[in-house]
Amino acid sequence: MANKKNRWFLPTNTDNLKMMVAQGLMSSPDGFSPNKYYKDELENYPGFIPVFKNSIPQSTLDLIISEQENMTACLIEIDLTKIIQGGVRNQNYKVIEVSVNEREDLLLILAPLPLSCIKQIIFRSENERISLEAEQKLSSNFILSDLKTHCSKSDEKLFKASNDKESIGFFHKDKVGENEIESQVDSVKLVNYPRIYAFGGLLTSLFYFAKNGKLSNNIYQDFCTIEKADLVDDKLCIHQYFNQIENDGILQIMYSKLLDKLISRENSKDDIIMLLEADDWDEKFKSRTQDLAQMLREFENNETTISEKFSKATRPLERLLLMLFHKESIGSLIEYQLDMFTEDDYLLFSLIFGVRDKFIKTPKFIREYQNLQNFISSKMVEYAHLELNSGVKFKSINSPKTIWDILNAKNTAKKSGKKLEITDCVQTVMNGDCQIQGNDRIFKGYAEPKYKIIESEYFKIISSKNISTETYNNLARLK
């Protein structure tokens, strides 16, 4: 008889689960928004995700619902096969390899983990499962998407721990000396979670605006492969910031300080003006930063229209700062349209608005795009472990196709063009041998024509179109 396959669980409560999904990854408590973390085993293993084999200690089951009345317990079943390299330790904090026949009762996995590592979310009762699924309909950022929920009679026993120490995978934290634990924990680098979430927001925003054309699509691909890119000027400054590449150019320094401010919680209009008016700018930059601050102070002046204000802004950074003062979120940016803006303008706006809003404030209709949430989660975790230099690697997830990808794929170009109603900016190029007889062109045989997008006309049409969840998912399913 074959050995029963081991199962691994992160026990928590639905409040923590919702926060993990909203932020896009499984993190340590320091990755949670302030006052959004509730007690579970995460706080006992800083920097790690603790997972139990096959059953849960009673003390843990009590802990995860201890902080408030009427809390709901849940078990996040982790798929260890998604971890292909590094990052796993035993309860003594010793590095081990993950194998099919693990002897350990508790594993510590270096945080953060992507949502794709979630095999399923298990509940004690069907009512609790249904209740959680209903909550996402009312939430702006808790979206189960491709995550599976589960409840069964056989799994009810997981919420009723046995007193038999061996059968519940019992462990003692005191097996390891306090000094040894502290030294092991101190050796784990802290994750800069705000930067990670900002990167996720940037990528998600870029994915949406990749619909605008070839340039936008290429920039999205450049940021997906964060270490390599062919970028210039403002976009290069943002890319170098996330790669922590420093130089003393005024544009890079200004973007680095602006991005620091936007990623922090101090990013109001007044905070940005105070940043530009600060005394610590190099003297050779002060004239430029003071001019920008004055421009923003005059933004509320109602004697000129918004169009006139943007028309006077001759540089990309000036237009970007004005847009940050004009619109409060990526959602409002998507709804906004001015004919004077180019594809490049919208690209820069989408980059910075994504950083400011972070992944958690991405509009719900975008997060519900097929497979996008899991993909962005995987990219955030990849970036986090790259920053940590941890060597941890996970199974890759293919990027969902952008609207531009779908419109330019041979099999879906014609169908998607019709669905998006952009046929006026699509040029048909006939294939095959052609003979001229009088005023007629006669083709030998028949071949499906090629469809070439006239980019200048395309941007005018597509930039004003909002791509709903239903529209995108229908296009993504085209064959």
Image (tube, rainbow, N blue to C red):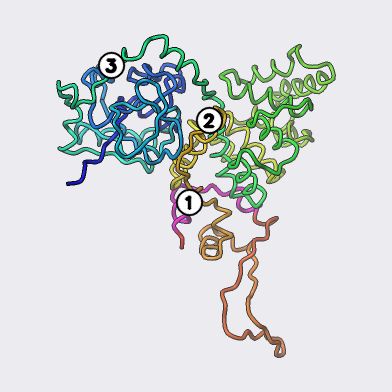
Q: Is residue 391 above or below residue 92?
A: below
- Given residues 177 and 226, the one toward you in this image is 177
First in sequence: mark 3 vs mark 1: 3
Q: Secondary structure at mark 1?
A: helix
First in sequence: mark 2 vs mark 1: 2
Give the overall secondary structure of the magenta segment: helix
**How far from the left and from the top, in percent, is residue 304?**
74, 30
Q: Residue at x 67, y 20 (%)?
A: 272
Q: Residue furthest bottom?
A: 437
Q: Is residue 426 above or below residue 243?
A: below
- For this view, does 167 lie left or right of residue 374? left
Q: Which mark is residue 384?
A: 2
Q: Quadrant of residue 349?
A: top right
**How far from the left and from the top, in percent, is residue 103?**
29, 31
Residue interval drawn in magenta? 459-477
Q: Which mark is residue 472?
A: 1
Which one is in front in this view, the residue at disc 2 or the one at disc 3?
Answer: 3
Q: Which residue is mark 3?
A: 172
Three-letter code, disc 1 = Tyr
Asked if the residue under mark 1 is in contact with the one under mark 3, i.e. CB atoms within 8 Å, the reply is no
- Given residues 422 and 299, the one toward you in this image is 422
Q: Is residue 306 above or below residue 294?
A: below
Q: Is residue 219 above or below residue 112?
A: below
**How far from the left and from the top, in percent, is residue 408?**
59, 60
| Any part of residue 64 in sight | yes
Q: Residue furthest top?
A: 179
Three-letter code, disc 2 = Ala
Disc 2 crowd, CA 10 A, few/some/many (<14, 14-19, 20+): many
